[in-house]
Amino acid sequence: MPDTNKWFSMGVPWYRPSSGGSHHATGTSPKERALSQEEKLIADIMGAQIRLEHLFADDRSDPLFSSHLTMSQLKIMLLLSRRGTLAGGELARMLGVGAATLSGMIDRLVVQDLVTRTEDLNDRRVRRIGLTKAGTELIEGIITAGVAKQRELLSRLSAEELTIVAQAMELLVREAGCQAAAAAEASLSDPAAITPASGEAQRDQSD
């Protein structure tokens, strides 16, 4: 079994237990010991996740490696894949950039025939950004490549092990949903949470 008490990211350990193993410091309360154990478990889980991601990243058959997309371009295509065609100003707001910056990014994607820029049918001043057929196929290939690798990995587990993984995933999805709902509620009640770039993006929707 691999040592689950270390997180090796570029050779740097994320967590290393202190000497003494299970011995507790004198005067440590049960609550403090419980919190310490939770922190250790979190470190172990994060360490395992990082090692798994590194193993997946070593697979050069992933279409991401042959796409030559920058991180910003990948973000744009992922947003368009999830949200569909978007107005330029709305897309800029989501990315936290100005309209001029977004325009340059879109220009390069248009040249690669990955996205289109068209007039809004209801407002000719607004340009709408969407994926081309080639862009859709590329981003779907990148997304499903990870799903296929995960499915292959899961198929190697026993029924009992799959049950444990399924329960863990349900817990993570539950908490992620709660966190997202809380963040959405906080943003609605706090207008100041809008990024500074959003004002610029709204003023320049036509770009």
Image (cartoon, helix red, strand yellow):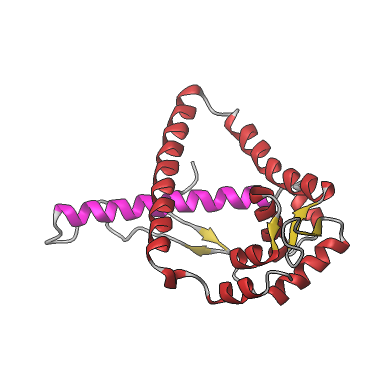
* Residue sitting farthest toward the top: 159
* Residue 171 locus on image (x, y percent): 40, 40
Residue 109, quarter of picture: bottom right
Q: Is residue 124 above or below residue 173?
A: below
Question: What are the residue bounds of the magenta stretch?
Answer: 30-57
The residue at the point 55 percent across, 51 percent down is 51
Q: In this view, does 198 lie above or below 14?
A: below
Please say whether residue 44 is one of the residues in the magenta stretch: yes
- Residues 156 and 149: in front is 149
Q: 114 or 1: nearer the eye?
A: 114
Q: Which of 5 and 60 is in front in this view?
A: 60
Q: Residue furthest front?
A: 122
Q: Is residue 21 visible?
A: no
**How far across and how far down the image is residue 116, in percent?**
81, 57
Instruction: Please state the horizontal and vertical placement of residue 64, each as a whole percent of the image.
Output: 75, 52
Q: What secondary structure characterizes most of the magenta part?
A: helix
**Left or right of 127, for residue 111:** right
Percent position of residue 165, x then y: 47, 34
Residue at 43% in and 56% down: 184
Would residue 160 be found to the left or right of residue 52 on screen?
Answer: left
Q: In which quarter of the image is residue 188?
A: bottom left
Location of the C terminus by quadrant is bottom right
Can residue 1 be spotted in the picture? yes
Taking depth in this image into account, of 48 and 64 the one nearest to the observer is: 64
Left or right for 44, reference 204: left
36 inside magenta stretch:
yes
Q: Could you tell me which residue is drawn at 41 percent across and 58 percent down?
A: 183
Q: Residue at x 87, y 56 (%)?
A: 113
